[in-house]
Amino acid sequence: MKDLFQSPLFGIVLCIVCFEVGLWVNKKLKTPLANPLLIAIAMVIIILNVFHIPLEDFQQGGDVISLFLAPATAVLALSIYSQLEVLKKNFLPALVGCTVGSLASMFSAFWLCQLFQLDDSLVQAMIPKSVTTPIAMGISEQHGGLVPVTVAAVIVTGILGAIAAPWLVKLFHVKNKAAAGLAIGTCSHAVGTSKALQMGEIEGAMSSIAMGFSGIITVILSLFY
C-alpha cells in the first residue's frame, strides 16, 4: 500500500477523481457555492489526513499536474484571439481598469495585514494574492514572503472570486460583458477566468486578458513597495 501512495499515479488519479466528484456535486446542486475546485481540495485534504498519507507522497503526482499550469494558461490566448476586435475597442479601459484593480487588491491586502499586525514575511506573501500562481510565487519570493502562504492565498482568492462573481455581476447589474470579464480576471486570476469562460465567450476572453494585464502590472507595482 505504501508503494501505491508513493507512485506519481496516486496523486494524479486522486486529483482527477476528486475534481470529477466536485463537478458532479456542482451539477446536482447548481450553486456557485459548490465550486468543483473547492470540493476537490477539501476531499484531498480529508483523504490525506484520514489515511495518514504524507504530503510528499501525494506531491509526486501533484507536481506532474502542476507542469500543465503554464500550457493551460497559454491556451487562453485562443480565447483572446477570438475576441481580438473586442480587445481593440476596449484596450484603454481594460488597461486602466486592470491597473486600478491591481492597486486596490495590493493595497487592501497590505492594509489588512497591517491592521492585524502580521509579520512582514506574511505581508509580502499576501500582497500578490490576486495574480496567477507562477507570478505570485515569483513576487513573493523576491520580496522575502512565505511562498506556501502565497500559494494558499492565491487559491483562496481564486475560489472566492469564482463563487462570488455570478452573484456580484447580478447584484450590481453589470450588463457589459467585457467589463464583467475584466473585473473577474483582475480579482481572481485563472480560477475566476474558468468561471468567466462558463459565463460567456466575451467574459472569458476579457478575463484572460485581465489576468495577463494584472500579472504584468502587479510585477511592476511590486518594484515600488
Image (cartoon, grey):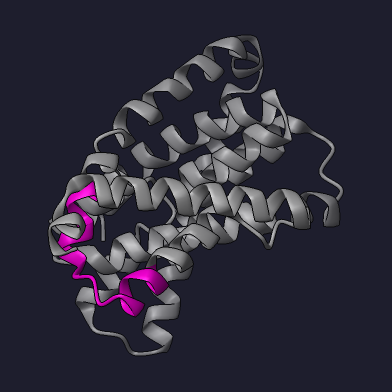
Say if 85 sits above or below 87 in the image: above
Answer left or right for 50 relative to 52: right
- Nearest the viewer among 82 and 124 is 82
Screen quadrant of the C terminus: bottom left
Horizontal arrangement in the rendering, residue 28 relative to residue 146 (left or right): right
Instruction: Name the dominant secondary structure of the magenta segment.
Output: helix
Q: How many marks?
A: 0
Q: Where is residue 168 in the image (x, y as percent from the top left)?
A: 76, 56
Relative horizontal placement of residue 12, taking residue 169 as reference (left or right): left
Q: Quadrant of residue 54?
A: bottom left
Whole-percent x, y for residue 209 in the image: 51, 29
20 over 77 or under it: above or below? below
111 and 54: which is toward the camera: 54
The residue at 24%/65% (across/down) is 148
Instruction: Using the image as rendered, state which of residue 6 and residue 169 is in the foreground.
Output: 6
Q: Give the range drawn in magenta.
A: 45-62
**Residue drawn at x 45%, y 79% as measured from the top left:** 112
Residue 75, horizontal then vertical, whole percent: 42, 21
Residue lying at the far front in this picture: please name it. Answer: 1
Out of 205 and 19, give the one closest to the viewer. 19
The picture places residue 204, in percent across and down from the top left corner, at 62, 30
Where, by quadrant of the figure, is residue 216 drawn?
A: top left
- Whether residue 48 is in magenta: the answer is yes
Q: Residue at x 84, y 51 (%)?
A: 170
Q: Is residue 94 above or below residue 134?
A: above
Let me know if residue 101 appears in the view: no
The answer to whether residue 79 is visible is yes
